[in-house]
Image: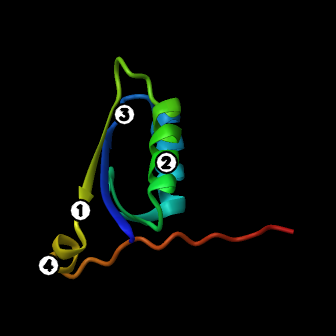
């Protein structure tokens, strides 16, 4: 079963915010400046991502919210507007 997550964050520190953004970008699509939609194939990967996020944040000043979405809720999602999601363009410099 695929685990669909909506993850949003409020991180005041630029370096930590960048690290969290980069981590989430590996796993899913950015849908707003600090919001990602992520689909993970196993509960173990969900726990691993949560653990990685927990290690990156400052628990006193940062906040990360993880909202699990049911497959039914994800299928009924409504998107208003035509703005396209940012696609991460990975490239290599050799």
What is the x, y in percent for residue 72?
A: 18, 75
Secondary structure at badge 4 equals loop
What is the x, y in percent for residue 50?
A: 44, 43
Q: Could you tell which of marks 2 and 1 lies nearer the N-terminus?
A: 2
Q: What is the spatial separation of the Cα atoms under label 1 and label 4, in whole angstroms? A: 11 Å
Mark 1 lies on residue: 69
Farthest-out residue, right: 94
Is residue 67 visible to us here? yes
Crowdedness near tag 4: few (<14), some (14–19) or many (≥20) residues, C-alpha within 10 Å: few
Q: Up-down: is 14 above or below 45? A: above
Residue 11 in which image quadrant: top left
Q: Could you tell which of marks 3 and 1 lies nearer the N-terminus?
A: 3
- Name the disc covering residue 49, or none: 2
Q: Which residue is rendered at x = 43% and y = 23% of the image?
A: 58
Secondary structure at badge 1 equals strand
- The answer to whether marks 2 and 4 mark residues whose Cβ atoms lie closer than 8 Å is no
Is residue 31 visible to us here? no
Secondary structure at badge 3 equals loop
Q: What is the spatial separation of the Cα atoms under label 4 and label 3, in whole angstroms? A: 30 Å
Mark 3 lies on residue: 11
Q: Up-down: is 94 above or below 33? A: below
Q: What is the spatial separation of the Cα atoms under label 2 and label 3, in whole angstroms? A: 17 Å
Q: What is the spatial separation of the Cα atoms under label 2 and label 4, in whole angstroms? A: 25 Å
What is the x, y in percent for residue 82?
A: 21, 82
Q: What is the spatial separation of the Cα atoms under label 3 and label 1, in whole angstroms? A: 23 Å
Q: Could you tell which of marks 1 and 4 lies nearer the N-terminus?
A: 1
Q: Is residue 78 left or right of residue 17?
A: left
What is the x, y in percent for residue 81?
A: 16, 78
Image quadrant containing the N terminus? bottom left
Farthest-out residue, top: 60
Mark 4 lies on residue: 76
């Amino acid at each position: 079963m695929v685990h669909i997550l909506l993850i949003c964050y409020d991180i005041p520190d630029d370096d930590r915010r960048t690290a969290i953004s980069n981590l989430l970008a590996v796993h899913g699509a950015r849908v707003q400046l600090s919001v990602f939609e992520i689909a993970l194939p196993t509960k173990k990967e969900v726990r691993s991502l949560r653990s990685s996020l927990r290690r990156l944040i400052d628990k006193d000043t940062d906040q990360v919210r993880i909202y699990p979405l049911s497959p039914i809720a994800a299928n009924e999602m409504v998107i208003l507007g035509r703005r396209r999601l940012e696609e991460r363009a990975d490239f290599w410099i050799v």
